[in-house]
Amino acid sequence: MSVVNITSQNFQSAVMEESLPVLIDFWAAWCGPCRMVSPIVDQLAEELDGKIVVGKVNVDEEPELAAKFGIMSIPTLAVMKSGQVVKKSIGAKPKEAIRAMLDL
C-alpha cells in the first residue's frame, strides 16, 4: 500500500475510522531529519502492507492537525490504534526503532 497523504479533509476516514494501526509521520519539506526518516517510513509502508496504514502530515500545509497532536518538533512519528495515540517519537530514528513502535 502506498503512503496516504493525511489532511484535515481525510483525517476521519484515513485515521479515526481505520481498523489497522496507523503510523503518522509529521514532517515538512525544509526539515533535514524529516528527509532522513521519510524513506524509512516508505519502506515500512511496503513491508507491512496489510498490517498497518502509513500516513504523512505536512505540518506546513496542515497546521491544525499539527496543533491537534501537539507537534512542537519534527519529525514526529505517532502510532494510533482505535483513534488513540498509543506511541509517539520525536526526532530521526533508525528503522528498527520505528518498527519497534508498531508492536508487530
Image: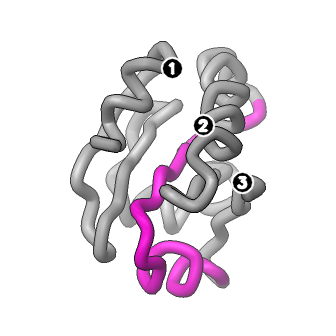
Q: Give the left or right position of residue 69, taking residue 57 as reference.
A: left
Q: Looking at the image, is mark 2 or mark 3 nearer the viewer?
A: 2
Q: Which residue is mark 1?
A: 95
Q: Residue at x 34, y 43 (%)?
A: 104
* Residues at circles 2 and 1 in contact by the CB criterion of under 8 Å: yes
The residue lying toward the viewer, choosing from 87 and 67, is 87
In the image, what residue type sits under mark 3? Val
Distance (Cα) linking label 2 and label 1: 8 Å
**Residue 3: assigned label:** 3
Mark 2 closeness class: few <14, some 14–19, many ≥20 residues within 10 Å? some
Q: What kind of element bears circle 2?
A: helix
Mark 1 closeness class: few <14, some 14–19, many ≥20 residues within 10 Å? some
Quadrant the N terminus occupies: bottom right
Of callouts 2 and 3, the N-terminal one? 3
Identify the magenta region.
Answer: 10-29
Q: Give the left or right position of residue 35, taking residue 103 as reference.
A: right
Q: Which residue is mark 2?
A: 44
Q: Is residue 91 above or below residue 65?
A: above
The residue lying toward the viewer, choosing from 27 and 41, is 41
Of callouts 2 and 1, the N-terminal one? 2
The residue lying toward the viewer, choosing from 37 and 52, is 52
> For residue 31, what is the image quadrant?
top right
